[in-house]
Amino acid sequence: MIRKIKKEVGCSFKENIQYMDQTLPVEKSFDIIRREMEIGGKESVFYYIDGFIKDEAMLKIMDSFLSITAEDLPQDAETFSKQKIPYVEVDVLKCFDDILRNVLSGTAVFFVEGYDAALCMDCRSYPARGVDEPDKDKSLRGSRDGFVETIVFNTALMRRRIRDPHLIMEMTEAGQSSRTDIAVCYMSDRVDEELLNNIKSRIEKLEVDDLRMNQQSLAEALFKRKWFNPFPKFKFTERPDTAAACLLEGKVVILVDNSPSAMILPTSILDMIEEANDYYFPTLTGMYLKISRTLITIATVFFTPLYLLYMQNPQWLPGVFSFVMVRDQINLPLIWQFLLLELSIDGLRLAAMNTPTMLSTPLSVIAGIVMGEFSVESGWFNSEVMLYMAFVAVANYTQPNFELGYALKFMRLMLLVLTAVFNLYGFVAGCILVLCFLVFNKTLSGRNYLNVKIN
């Protein structure tokens, strides 16, 4: 839970300023600005963060303050905020916890002599990039905008798509040090009230110092996953159209400041493998894409373990498929070939992520030639094994969820090891374990990946 300062603003102007100067590192931090000026013959002190304030807006507001005379100065802060501040977002604060949080969030807060409250003006202008289409979650015919790291921009992108008064966006915060803003978005006439109350209750009861990894830190704090079950508990998207569609389906969308993606609840295995292209095409095409993606996702798990099972028991292989048999000499056991290639593919993927863009294509070609041609000629790997692992590596990218891709990879590795050690019994046991991982993977909503209620 957030640690709050209970101290209230007093009537003594000097005491209020002294407390602010002691609490905020005004002298040590160059970006915390303390600006003194006179308003209507009274002293006033402004506090704000350099880099967050719109200079043009503050210049006009301060210019209007300088024109206030002693006769025109209201007697209380409430009247001053209504009559003398020419700005749209103004608030009157009496708790120092709210005052400090607003200052450190980027708003401008100022005290006026004789007032028992502080005045807050939201003149923030956060550094932000453009709402370009995300690299990972692209669409052929859909919109070309995407979430950014500024939470207000993200809520606006969804509000632009849903012009309904039932769309509620509740703002809260988590982390005693970070005080990270969290927006819980839902359609009040469609949401599951039990799920919504569960989510809000868990966020309010969070006892964490910070959300250093934004949404991932929030996800880990909301639901303590079992380390041995790799399937993700939440669905993430960087597309505002996908988030808006989920809201209209009655789901809850959680936005975290500084994170360019939305967390969607509840979720299932079918939700995980969906993508925006499924909805931007005619019904028949969309269904075909869903079915194809589902079949290919299943194939990425079972294709290489099945091949290993048949190579260990060639008598089970039908004659029509005899061409898949390994013809060359096997210098390294097939199981070790598969495991080494799994590790090598991950190494190439990590290398591609850290390779400069201008070099990624030529280096990928060189790596493909070395891994493909020379590794087979040297006798380390057989060409059939290279072919099937290449299919698995490419097929992993047919579904958009990165975490689900690695969960399927771990299931495939488990099946390979069990099949190599226990033959048919190991393969059957591995299939049962995969099903158990899915059935007993309880999510925050109380439902598993097969969308079955778990008590």
Image: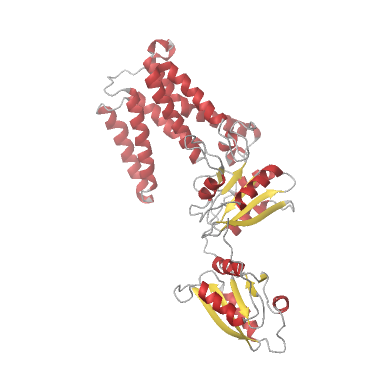
- Image location of residue 327, percent across then percent down: 31, 17
Query: Is 148 placed above or below 290 here?
Result: below
142 or 128, which lies in front?
128
290 or 44, which lies in front?
44
Residue beneath the point at 63% across and 69% down: 95
The figure's colour scheme reads secondary structure
**On the picture, is 161 further left or further right than 222?**
right
Residue 99 at least partly seen: yes
280 or 79, which lies in front?
79
Residue 292 at least partly seen: no
Q: Quadrant of the C terminus?
A: top right
- Image location of residue 240, percent across then percent down: 60, 49
Task: State the count of labels.
Answer: 0
Query: Is 19 placed above or below 205 here?
Result: below
Residue beneath the point at 65% across and 32% down: 453
Residue beneath the point at 59% across and 35% down: 268
Q: Quadrant of the N terminus?
A: bottom right
Query: Is 391 placed above or below 212 here?
Result: above
58 or 419, which lies in front?
419
**On the picture, is 335 further left or further right than 244?**
left
**On the picture, is 255 further left or further right than 308?**
right
- Image location of residue 437, percent across then percent down: 52, 30
- Image location of residue 153, percent across then percent down: 59, 58
Residue that lies at the very extreme toward the front in this rendered image: 6
Residue beneath the point at 62% across and 54% down: 183
